[in-house]
Image (tube, rainbow, N blue to C red):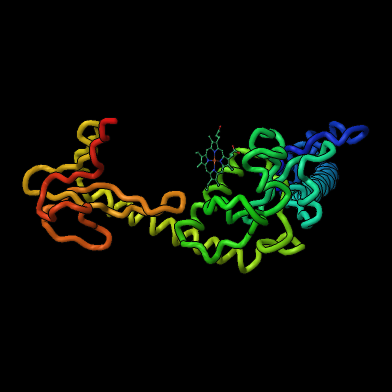
Amino acid sequence: MQESRQRRPPEPLGGPQRGAVPRAVPLAPPRRGGIRGLPLLAVLGVALLALRLGVRVVTLVKTRGAAVEAANQQQEQQQRLQQSDSRKAQAPSVLSKAQLAQADGSDGRPVYLSILGDVFDVSSKPEFYGKGSGYHHFVGTDGSRAFVTGEFEGPPRAEVLDLSPEDVHGIVGWRDFYFRTYPHKGRAEGLYYTAAGEPTDTLRQVEARAAEGARLKEEKAKEVAKYTSCGMKYTTAEGGKVWCETGMYPRKLFDGMDGGAASFRCVCMNDIGWSDLLQVYPDCDPDSSTCQTAPPLEES
Ligand code: HEM
C-alpha cells in the first residue's frame, strides 16, 4: 500500500485534510523494546498514531480510487449513450411513396430521386432533373430500371431482377455515382426497403446479381485483353477496313452490350476458325488478313 502511495499520491481533497496525507507517508515498522532514549510507552503511542494515520491514508486512497472508478464508469456510460444517439442520428430516414412523390420540385419543394431504394436530393441540377428536362423521368419515384434500359417513356419501373447480371451491376454503379455526387436523404419504402428501413429480399438478390455481374465483366475484360487488336482505317475514298499481320485473321469479338446493342471489337486470331463470339467479317474470307468493313462513299 505504501508503494502505491509513493507511485501515485492521493490528490489534495481540500480544506482541513490538506497536508495530512504527506505527513502520514513515513510508516516505519515499530522496533521491539522501543527506541534508545525514549520510554517504551511514548514509542508505542507514536507508533499507534502513525498506524491510525496510515489507516486514514489507506481509506482516503481507497475512497479516491472508488470515486475515480465511478467517474470512469459514468464517462463510459455517457460515451455509450452518445454513440447510440449518433447512430440513431445517422440511421437513414424512411420515406413513404407519397413523401417521395411530393419531392418533385413543385412549389419550392426539393427534387428527390430513388435508385434501388436509396433516395438522393438532386435539386442542385435542375438542368438534368427539372420539369421538361431529359432525366425528369427519375424524379419523385424509383426508376432504377431505366438507368440501363434508357426507357424514359411510360411509367418509371423499379424492378431490375429480370435484367442481366451485368446490367444490374451497371445500375449499382449508378447508385454509387449518386452516393458520390448528391446528398443521401434516406430510403424509400417499397421494393427495396421495408417501412422500417430494412433491406428486403429483393434488394439482397439485386446485390448478389450485381456481384455476379461484376465477376462476369472482369472475366470478359481478361478474355478480351488476351487478343491483339486489328489495324483499322476509314477513308471516304476507300471505305472502312480492318487488317492483321500476315498469318493472322481479323475476327469480330463480342465484347458486351452497349446501350442495349451488342458491341464488337476487331481482334487478330492466329487460326482461321470462328465461333458466335469470334465472328468472321461479312463478305470476308476466313483466311484473309484484311477485310472491308464499310464501302467507299460514292461520289455524288
Ligand atoms: C441508358 C441511357 C442513359 C441514361 C440512363 C442516362 C442518364 C443520365 C443521367 C442520370 C444524367 C445526369 C447525371 C448527373 O446527375 O450528373 C446524364 C447526364 C448526361 N447524359 Fe445521359 N443517359 C443516357 C444516355 C445518354 C446518351 C445516349 C447521351 C448522348 C447522346 C447522353 C448524354 C448525357 C450528357 C451529355 C449528360 C451531361 C453530363 C454532364 O454534363 O455532366 N446520355 N445521363
On the rendered structure, is 15 left or right of 248? right
Nearer the observer, 235 or 16: 235
On the rendered structure, is 114 left or right of 290? right
Give the residue furthest to the bottom: 201
Nearer the observer, 194 or 291: 291
Please determine whether, in this image, residue 253 is positioned above or below residue 131: below
Can the viewer see residue 62 in this picture?
Answer: no
Q: Determine the residue positioned at 83% across, 36% down.
A: 108
Please determine whether, in this image, residue 216 is positioned above or below residue 111: below
On the rendered structure, is 299 left or right of 127? left
Q: Determine the residue positioned at 82% across, 47% down.
A: 67
Ligand 1 lies in which image quarter?
Answer: top right
Residue 267 in percent (x, y) is at: 22, 48
Give the residue furthest to the left: 247
Q: How many marks?
A: 0
On the rendered structure, is 202 left or right of 141? left
Please determine whether, in this image, residue 300 is positioned above or below residue 57: above
Residue 83 in percent (x, y) is at: 74, 49
Q: Quadrant of residue 205?
A: bottom right
Position of the C terminus by quadrant? top left
Can the viewer see residue 52 in this picture?
Answer: yes
Residue 236 in percent (x, y) is at: 26, 31
Q: Quadrant of residue 200?
A: bottom right
